Amino acid sequence: GEMVQMLLKNDLVDELWLNIFPLTLGKGKKLFAGGAIPAAFTMTKSVVTPGGIIAGNYKRAGKVKTGSF
């Protein structure tokens, strides 16, 4: 977990593979805490298992664009 924090903080991440499990187990560790550089990502692939686990692949999409919805 600490390596991911260091990579995000130093803007060295160009792709994320995230597995999201449908449960909570207390406070846990935050993935984007500790000075992560703001960056935009675009989902390129996703799968939802019968058990509700979401596996998503996100690729870097440049700087964060702000504006209205």
Image (cartoon, rainbow, N blue to C red):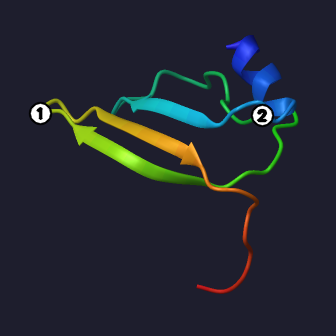
Q: Residue furthest bottom?
A: 68
Residue 27 position in % (x across, y down):
62, 25
Residue 35 position in % (x across, y down):
88, 36
The residue depicted at 66 percent of the width and 30 percent of the height is 31
Task: Check contact, mark 2 vs mark 1: CB within 8 A.
Answer: no
Q: Residues within 10 Å of mark 2 (few under 14, many from 20)?
A: few
Residue 4 position in % (x across, y down):
70, 20
The amino acid pointed to by label 1 is: Pro
- Quadrant into which the C terminus falls: bottom right
CA distance for labels 2 and 1: 30 Å
Residue 58 position in % (x across, y down):
50, 43
- Quadrant into which the N terminus falls: top right
- Which callout, 2 or 1, points at the residue further toward the start of the chain? 2
Q: Residues within 10 Å of mark 1 (few under 14, many from 20)?
A: few
The residue depicted at 82 percent of the width and 21 percent of the height is 6
The residue depicted at 18 percent of the width and 33 percent of the height is 49
Query: In the rendered view, does 58 fall on the left or right side of 51?
Result: right
**Residue 43 position (above or below residue 10):** below
The quadrant holding residue 7 is: top right
Q: Secondary structure at mark 2?
A: loop
The amino acid pointed to by label 2 is: Ala
The residue depicted at 47 percent of the width and 21 percent of the height is 25
The numbered mark at residue 33 is: 2
For mark 1, what is the residue? 50
Query: In the rendered view, does 8 fall on the left or right side of 41?
Result: right
Query: In the rendered view, does 14 fall on the left or right side of 17?
Result: right
The quadrant holding residue 53 is: top left
